[in-house]
Image (spheres, helix red, strand yellow):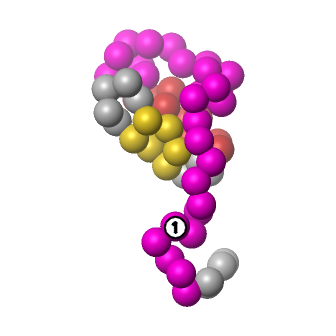
């Protein structure tokens, strides 16, 4: 998943990672409490293997 903040900050990772990162960013950068529901409303699905076309999956 990927989330782009209004300020241009971008984070990528698994769903739980993105939720954690956005909550942390919201607090430290904007002094905003971000709920997991709010993160789900703005995240986008991105390929986890983008940029790696060797097909090597864990
Ligand atoms: Zn931001």
In this orientation, which residue lies closer to the viewer: 58 or 51? 51
Residue 47, image quadrant: bottom right
Residue 38 position by quadrant: top right
Question: Compared to 1, does 36 lie above or below?
Answer: above
Q: Is residue 28 left or right of residue 51?
A: left
Q: Which residue appears at 50% of the width and 77% of the height?
A: 52
Residue on which the image places disc 1: 50
**Closest to the observer, 53 or 17:** 53
**Placement of 29 over or under 48, stated as above or below:** above
- Where is residue 41? Give x, y as percent: 64, 26
Indicate yes or no whether the magenta region holds residue 33: yes
Which residue sits furthest top?
Answer: 32
Q: Residue at x 66, y 78 (%)?
A: 58
Image x and y of residue 6, in percent: 37, 24
Residue 39 visible (yes or no): yes
Identify the residue at image location x=32%, y=33%. Answer: 8
Task: Confirm whether residue 28 shows in the render.
Answer: no
Element marked by disc 1: loop
Q: Which region is colored magenta? A: 26-54
């Amino acid at each position: 998943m990927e989330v782009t903040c209004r300020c241009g900050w971008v984070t990528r990772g698994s769903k739980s990672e993105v939720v954690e990162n956005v909550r942390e960013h919201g607090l430290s950068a904007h002094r905003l409490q971000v709920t997991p529901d709010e993160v789900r409303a703005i995240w986008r699905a991105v390929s986890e293997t983008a940029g790696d076309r060797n097909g090597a999956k864990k």
